[in-house]
Image (cartoon, rainbow, N blue to C red):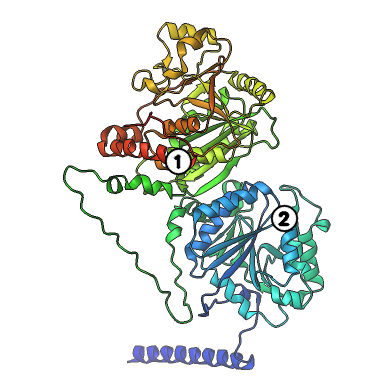
Amino acid sequence: MIANRKTISVFTICICLQACILVSFLFVINQNGGVPSDSELDLQRRSIRLIPRQCETLHFLICVPELEAVRSLSVLVKSVIIHRVNPLHFHFVINDLQVNITIHKLFETWRLPQADISIYSPEELVDVLHSDNVPFSKVIVTEVQTVFETDVRVFWNEFFNFESSEVIGLVGTIWDANPYSRGLILINVERLMKKSMLDVLENIIMESKLDPGRHLPPEKSPMKRLWKSFTDDNSRAVRLLPCYWYIETTFRCFDSVSEVLSFNSKTVIEEDGQMGYERRLYFKTALYSLQDLDGNLLRSRNITCNWNGRKPQISPIPIRETTPQKPGRRDPKILCADFYKRETLKLRTHTFFVGNLPEDPPSNDVTLALQTDFYRLIQMFELVASYWTGPISLAVYANDQQAHEVFRFASSSKAMRTRHDIAIHIGYEERDLRQYPFNHMRNIALGEVRTPFIYMSEIDFLYKSTAYEDIRRRLGHIVEKQEDGENQAIVVPAFETEHLNLSYIPKSKNELVRLYTQGKLRFFHSLDFSKGHEATNFTKWMTSVVPYPVTFNLGYEPYLVLSKKGLPEFPLLFSGMGRDKIIYTQMLKVLGYKLSVSPNAYMIHMPHWPSTSKMMWDADGNYRWCVYQLTARFLKKFMNENKLINEEDEYR
């Protein structure tokens, strides 16, 4: 009984203490008007409430200083698109023409739904802000090396919490000498204009004109002056945002969960021991998972926000009825549907993904234009770059994960580190394509060439060590004598070998002739498709010291050096294996090009296993039938479009 009485007494005392604590807490809240004090810790953990609103377009302002920043921009856009439920409008401030072209091409081919872009120079955007057509009333300003970890409405709805005096939202850095972070800024542009504070936004915009990598003294930096003015004069205009809204790799916050991550430092993730293993892994996982995400999936990312209380009406896709094919007959519309689909297909394209090409080249300069898949790039790139000493425009067919590996490969490549005339472009993989898109990739490589002439080749070839100089000398003569206006094309003879010594190419024509006579070399495809190159007349080439003309024959597909001016694109209808280069040669013939063989330059094909496209060509009889059927139709149409008479060399 005594033990039970003691237990009851202790329990009663605990209940009384808890009641006293609760009463004291309620008394404190009532004394403060029911609102907790705005302490620093309370500010860091401010709760976020998503307010249901109409399907408002959210605006982003991003300065893109250089070509390399476009890679980071792609990751930023992925992180925003994958979480968003609102339409988006990206406003890019760019001070470089090539960056402008690259971003325009990327978004044009990406085709993101309800994600518009506008591109301005710094001066253009400043002028727009002073006009009556300001493109946004509110805007989120961020940097390209940023990853969003949540829906951007979290930040956009903060605009509706601004006090009447507040015009700009900044993330406080707390301990840093610079009191605010520049990586995430919320700006109410309407209030800026009313308070005559547009210089705030102009400073942010005009800082993009600084050369990449240029560091100004703190007192001369526009952003430093901007932050100082807020600290000293306009502190009431600033709304302090929680620090965990924007965390840099070198910045510690009270909260371990972040809304936005910054990757301004290129090495800190790998090398900063102060971050700790878990924090470093958190940053790396967030970054790499978005880099590897297939960006084509975002094309079907539906907008799920509420449109005036009604769901958007989606029209059903009509089902096309097709007449069953009769036995013993082949209908091209059915069997060859894959070909027609290629004509309207646009690969998501990131030009100048790595590297660059020289500006203002000489009048006789030539660029080697190549296309390849990811695996052949790893195998052949260094060898090709060691034999061809001129500019190279290389298009790589890769998925998002492989594109990340392309960048890592290029970062460790000796050729990419020591040369400044190589550009690698990415044509992102389309899973619907049955075959490798040869002509799509050729057009990507051709489209970015800056020299007056283009040498169209393949990644599997190596070249005479002086081929670049030999071709340039020949082009110099053509440029000097170009009076009659005839289209000129130089044929570079192609050979092949079965030897696997990839490090050796004959250094001179005499040595090549000796190996050819001994049977160690033969002209390209001489065993399986001799028509492709026999018109080059290799017997005559062995003894020739001057260029000589070529007579076209059926099936001819040489490797050519051509003027970029007026050059047609490769037809996408034949983008897969089969007639892709043959058709192009016939197009040049129709357009009146004159071919002559270079007596000095040559190229040698390196042996490899048959590609997937080649095996599909050999195995699929219907595919080959489609190629033969569509070839004659395409050439007839091409001739009619160019007002030429159909000739008798049609393909049957």
Front in this rendered view, residue 630 or 98: 630
Q: Secondary structure at mark 1?
A: helix
* Quadrant location, the C terminus: top left
Q: Is residue 557 left or right of residue 259?
A: left
Q: Position of residue 123 (x, y in %)?
A: 75, 59
Residue 242 horizontal side relative to residue 380, left or right: right
Where 509 falls versus 524 (above or below)?
Answer: above
Mark 2 residue element = helix
Mark 2 and 1 residues: CB-CB less than 8 Å, in contact? Answer: no
Type of the residue with mark 2: Ser
Category of crowding for the residue at label 2, using alpha-carbon neighbours closer than 10 angstroms: few (below 14), some (14–19), many (at least 20): some
Compared with 533, 141 (above or below) is below
**Within-10-Å neighbours for mark 1: few <14, some 14–19, many 20+:** few
Is 301 or 332 nearer to us in this picture? Answer: 332
- Find residue 467 and report its horizontal and vertical position in percent: 58, 20
Q: Position of residue 179 (x, y in %)?
A: 73, 66
The amino acid marked with disc number 1 is Asn
For image coordinates 78% across by 70% down, the residue present is 231
| Residue 589 picture location, percent across and down | 48, 29
Return the residue at label 1.
640
Front residue of 416 and 621: 621
Per the model, the C-alpha gap separating discs 2 and 1 is: 50 Å
For residue 321, side relative to residue 206 (left or right) = left
Whether residue 281 is visible: no
Name the residue tied to disc 2.
208
Q: If you read the primary sequence from the N terminus, does the residue marked by circle 2 or circle 1 appear first?
A: 2
Which residue occupies 52% across, 79% down? Answer: 53
Which mark, by number, is residue 78?
none
Residue at image location 20% in from the left, 49% down from the top: 325
Farthest residue in the left direction?
327
